Image (cartoon, rainbow, N blue to C red):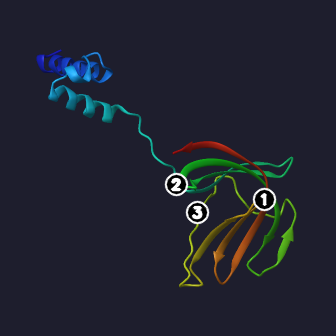
Amino acid sequence: MNARTVASALILTAAVLVVLGCGGREADLSPGERQLRKVVASVSRPFTSTPPEGYRVTAYDSRVHEWTIIRTGTFDGVFMTKKFVVVCVTFMNEAGIYTAGPYACPLQVGQFKQVRINFQDGDAPLEDIDQFSDTLMFTEGTSNRPTKQIFDIKRIELLDHRP
C-alpha cells in the first residue's frame, strides 16, 4: 500500500467513526466534522425510492381462479402498498360482447397497469382503472373501442405504508 492509499483509508475510517458517533457528541465536533458526518450519513443511507403508482399482476391461482394484484399508490395522502385478491366476473371485448365467468378475463401475470386517458383523441391508447367497494375494473383499448375486465375483490391486505 502506498502512502496515498493509507491516508485515504484513515480519512474514510475517521469519517465513519464520526458518522457512527464514535467521534464524540455533536456539540464536541468541529464544524468540519459535523459537515463530514452529514455528508457521509447522507451517502451511506440505503437507497429508497417510491415505486410507481399502479397495479401489478403478480400471481394467478388456477385452482380457485384468483388473481393477486399489488397496488401501489397514495391513499388519503399516505403512500401504501396493498395486495388485492380478485376473481374475474366478466370481460367485454371491443365489439361490446360480454363473456362471463372466472375464465373470461385475459389478465396476464407481470402486467403493470396505470391510468392513461386522452379525452382529446378517441383513438388514443386508453387505460383506466376503477375501484369500488368490492369491484375492480380495468378498461383498455381506446375510448372508441374499449375492452373491460371486471373483478370481484375477495380480499385486500395492507402490505406497507409510508407517511
Closer to the camera: disc 2 or disc 1?
A: 1
Residue in the picture at 86% in, 46% down: 63
Q: Of marks 2 and 1, which one's residue comes earlier in the chain?
A: 2
Q: Report the front residue among 161 and 77.
A: 77
Quick one: label 2 or label 3, which is nearer the N terminus?
Answer: 2
- Residue type, numbered disc 2: Pro
> SS for tag 3?
loop
Above or below 94: residue 106: above
Instruction: Give yes or no for contact between labels 1 and 3 (Cβ–Cβ under 8 Å).
Output: no
Query: Which amino acid lies under the numbered mark 1 shown in the image of this protein?
Result: Asp
Please, is residue 94 above or below residue 149 in the view?
A: below
Q: Position of residue 85 (x, y in %)?
A: 76, 50
> Residue 25, how many percent across, how many down?
26, 19
- The answer to which quarter of the image holds residue 137 is bottom right
Image point 48% across, 48% down: which residue? 50
Expressed as whole percent of the image width and height from the top left, the position of residue 114 reads 58, 63
Q: Secondary structure at mark 2?
A: loop
- Residue 52 marker: 2
- Distance from disc 2 to disc 1, alpha carbons, whole Å, reads 24 Å
Write down the quadrant of residue 133 in the picture. bottom right
Q: Nearer the viewer, residue 91 or 26?
A: 26
Q: Which mark identifies residue 114? A: 3
Question: Which x, y percent locates residue 143?
Answer: 64, 81
Q: Which residue is pictured at 58% across the width and 55% down the height? A: 76
Q: Which residue is mark 1?
A: 134
Q: Going from the N terminus, do you reach mark 1 or mark 3 first?
A: 3
Answer few, some or many: residues within 10 Å of disc 3's Cα (few below 14, many 20 plus, some between 14 and 19). Answer: some
